[in-house]
Image: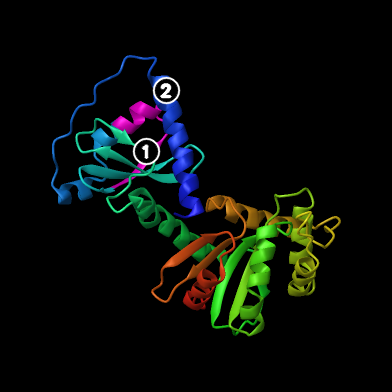
Amino acid sequence: MTLRTRLMITAVSALLATATVSLAATPAVPATPAPAMPKSAAAATGVQDSYKNLVQQVTHGQIQVLKQFTGPGDLVGLVVKSPQGQKAVIYVNKSAQYIIVGNVITADGQSQTATDTDKYVNTEIAQKAWANAANTAWILDGSAKAKHVIYAVADPNCSACHKFYSDTRPYVEKGDLAIRWILVGFLRPSSQGMAMAIINAKDPGALLKQNESQFNMDKEQGAIKPIDNPSADLKAKFAGNMKFMSDHQFTVTPTIIYLDAQGTAHTVMGALPEPQLKDMVNSAVKP
């Protein structure tokens, strides 16, 4: 299960748990079982009202139901959105009497919730992120002619980003991989100024290399100085990168975004061990 999926499940589970506890103080309103609908009719009308009403009742209208899909067994899957904009998957029974939140485990021990979250939530986020990444103030690391291209959202003071930078050097230096770094800043007070310094540099790739080659892992701190008095244009570029991170619900650095040969976008949170890193690099295509 990906870190993004765990975070989404945790966030929505917490909200539903809070809502359920507060609801216990008031008289329960029995849910009216919904008549069975043909799949074609359900698809044509979107989410059944009985499912939406159940979620609205339990959460006092705090969670929005976005989509309905066929769940495992006697369950119906719902894509929901929290007030903070996070999307997740929950389940209801077909008679709209119960909500199931968290990991639904299959007979072979796999998380059906994680599978459905990847299918109905993460893939959509990744596709939108890939489409919008080109409009950020990214900097090029590697050859523009590289066969494999990925985007990486990173903070200059991020130790996991530093590890990812180091681990990708063999691929970048061979000319096989180009990384388009989308620099953000939130881990330390100096992060914003350091990110803007790299974006604004005459040779951004060289300054990024300086930051990473002298990175202090003990202190989890980059090696360059923050920029003084950034221009309004530079601030706007940096703000655009931060908005990109927020809009696509990226909560961890590095977050890697890439497109495979089938045209499916993927996001990966955190540094990867070598076998998975190699597979990702080989799977990533050039835009």
Q: Which residue is mark 2?
A: 21
Q: Position of residue 87 (x, y in %)?
A: 44, 46
- In the picture, measured across the screen, residue 79 lies left or right of residue 227, that is left
Q: Secondary structure at mark 2?
A: helix
With respect to residue 67, does 275 lie above or below?
Answer: below
Write down the quadrant of residue 277 in the picture. bottom right
Q: Which residue is mark 1?
A: 101
Q: Which mark is residue 76?
A: none
Residue at 45% across, 27% down: 18
Q: Amino acid at mark 1?
A: Val
With respect to residue 109, does 136 lie above or below?
Answer: below
Query: In this picture, which residue range is highlighted in magenta?
Result: 54-68
- In the picture, measured across the screen, residue 117 lies left or right of residue 33, that is right
Foreground of the two, 207 or 281: 281
Q: Position of residue 217 (x, y in %)?
A: 76, 59
- Residue 242, can we see it? yes
Write down the quadrant of residue 206 in the picture. bottom right
Residue at 60% across, 65% down: 152
Foreground of the two, 60 or 102: 102
The image's colour scheme reads rainbow
Taking the view exactly as shown, the residue that stands out farthest to the front is: 108
Say whether residue 63 is magenta: yes
Q: Quadrant of the N terminus?
A: bottom left
Q: Secondary structure at mark 1?
A: loop
With respect to residue 164, does 221 lie above or below?
Answer: above
- Residue 137, can we see it? no
- In the picture, measured across the screen, residue 261 lies left or right of residue 194, that is left
Q: Position of residue 182 (x, y in %)?
A: 64, 63
